[in-house]
Image (tube, rainbow, N blue to C red):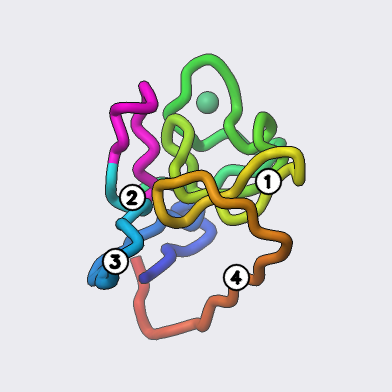
Amino acid sequence: MTVESENNRYRLHVTGYYGNTGDAFNDDHPEYGYNGKSNGMQFSTFDIDNDEYGSGNCAAYYQSGWWYRSCTMSRLNGNPFWYSTLIGDLIPISASRMMLQCGDYYY
Ligand SMILES: [Ca+2]
């Protein structure tokens, strides 16, 4: 997983998934009627809309920053009244922590 610089609005790149939970960063899930793939997206916040959802700001709608497309299937945080998921199914989680380590990758 790499995240580009602030100049590129923290665009996300995720590769190398393995496991049995489903790859919510790369799967589109058209059965839900939208493209939620976060891979390749820039980071959005409640006041900076970098998603591809033309009718609004996903970060404002879900009350959390994330790499939204239109909108997402891999939202880690959000309004506690909403379910959060990293696996393609709606599973409630009570807390989360995301940690990034600076590397030698520059875009
Ligand atoms: Ca939008």
Q: Amino acid at mark 3?
A: Asn
Between the C-alphas of marks 4 and 3, the distance is 21 Å
Which is more toward the observer, 8 or 2? 2
Viewer-side label of 2, 4:
4
- Distance between the alpha carbons at the discs numbered 1 and 2: 18 Å
Task: Write down the residue under mark 4.
Answer: 98
Give residue 2's quadrant in the image. Answer: bottom left
- How far apart are labels 3 and 2 at the CA level? 22 Å
Secondary element at tag 4: loop
The residue beneath circle 1 is 64
* Residue stretch in magenta: 28-40
In this rendering, position of residue 104 left or right of residue 47: left
Q: Can residue 50 be found in the magenta stretch?
A: no
Q: CA distance from mark 4 to mark 1?
A: 13 Å
Residue 17 x, y percent position in the rendering = 27, 68
Pointer 1 or 2: first along the chain: 2
For disc 4, the neighbor class at 10 Å (few under 14, some 14 to 19, many from 20) is few
The residue where tag 2 is placed is: 40
